[in-house]
Amino acid sequence: MHISEGVLSAPVLVAGALLTVGGTAWGLKKMDYEKIPEVAVLSSAFFVASLIHVPVGPSSVHLILNGLVGLLLGWMAFPSILVALALQALLFQFGGFTSLGVNTFNMAAPAVIAYYLFNLPVRRGNHLLSIVCGFAAGAIGVGTGALLVALALVSTGESFFHIAELVVFVHLPVMVIEGIITAFCVVFLKRVKPEILEVGR
Amino acid sequence: MKEVNYKSQNSKFKSQILILLNFAFFILICAFCIVREADAHKVNIYAYAEDGMIHSESYFVDGTKCKNSLIEVFDEKQGTRLLEGKTDDNGKFSFKIPKVASLKLVLHASMGHQNEYTLGEDEVREAMGGRQRPGESKETAKSSSQPAKISVKTGKEGLVSKEAASVGRGMSESEVEAVMERVIDRKLKPVMGILVKLREDSEKPGLTEIIGGIGYIVGLMGIAMYLKSRRKAIGTRHEAKGER
């Protein structure tokens, strides 16, 4: 779901960059000293996740893990994902530097949404509720990300429903896989280290 | 009392870091395991000119071919669009050389993936070489083939021309050239295939990039912690002064 260089028009790129700058600033402000290692580790996880690919139809999709990142980091998902995407652009030539803002927003905004929807029930709920909410966070992170990508691509003249259908359909298997991974991680962390789920402030 | 509290907090923090480091190792191990499966979100296009045609191949980084994707061909210098076409099931798209110029192929794969490849004018001209020599118009090319035929005729009649004599078996220079080109093209075909494959492989992200990237992240973490810890230290110093 990395949008390449030279695909989007300037207004979309600028809007994406501004939103990302805002989100990153807010995330950095929320970042405690004790939380920094966690942000870095999840950034690494996100960085590596895109190398695990799932072949689907005419395209190829990969794991994203933005639901998990959001669930554990809240707004700090923005700086975490920004760093990972910048390094992917630099080292793997995935996406590009002009589209970095849009790509970061497309992945980090769903992460924040997943945080607001599911962090509390995962922490407070019983075992079953944690599993369900973990799964939902993973799936919705990817699903919303796909919709945002489709929305960004509308500006290139492709019709929204056509492209959204394609992007979402292609990512359905990834949504399921990520849901399972996120649920597993959440349950494991809750048992071993519940305070990691507290995003603080 | 205060110090004890600080110490316990410190050890708690240490254990937290330890767990995170374990997590990091887990990720690194994953990276080692998946590096063979490396892939993902980037498309590549590669093209070469041969025998009056241009052949292009398009694929995602993991080697999946881009099926049914739009390719536009531009004249690089003038920026005019010359033609467009779609890739087949093997990600291939071939077309006749529309004009001798440096050609830019732009690949539009699904979901915002895009890349381009530029063929130099020399390469395009070289591929046209069999039919059209550089600098010659079509008419002159035809007229130059005329004397070649004549020399063959004369060869049959036994009046060996200078050209034919130099070749040996009564073939003109241009004929030999044509045969040679055919043979070389045939011989080079597998080599071209290997080159395309090599290019595909070299575009995949390797272990070096992955570990390098994680290294960058750890470094950034260090910088962030350093900055925050200084601020923290300054804060506590101020507090201590205030207490006094």
Image (cartoon, coloured by chain):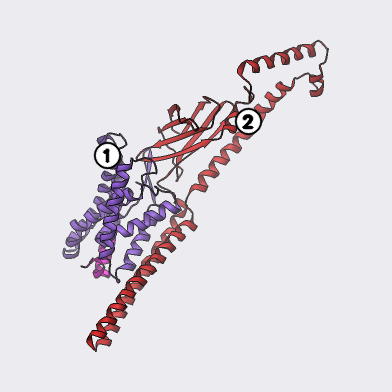
Chain colours: A purple, B red
How far across and down, in percent of the image, does residue B63 sit?
A: 46, 43
Q: CA distance from mark 1 to mark 2?
A: 45 Å
Q: Is residue A23 visible?
A: yes
Q: Is residue B201 above or below residue A29?
A: above
- Image point (30%, 40%), residue name: A153
Picture quadrant of residue B91: top left
Please tell me which residue lies in front, A54 or A128: A54
Q: Mark 2 — on which chain does it sit?
A: B
Going by the numbered disc 1, the residue's amino acid type is Ala
- Which residue is disc 2 drawn over? B186
Going by the numbered disc 2, the residue's amino acid type is Arg
Please tell me which residue lies in front, B133 or A93: B133
How far across and down, in percent of the image, does residue B112 sit?
A: 36, 40
Q: Which residues are magenta?
A: A184-201
Q: Is residue B153 left or right of residue B104?
A: right
Residue A195 drawn in magenta: yes
How far across and down, in percent of the image, does residue B40 sit?
A: 41, 47
- Image point (26%, 36%), residue name: A160
Residue A180 drawn in magenta: no
Q: Is residue A73 left or right of residue B203?
A: left
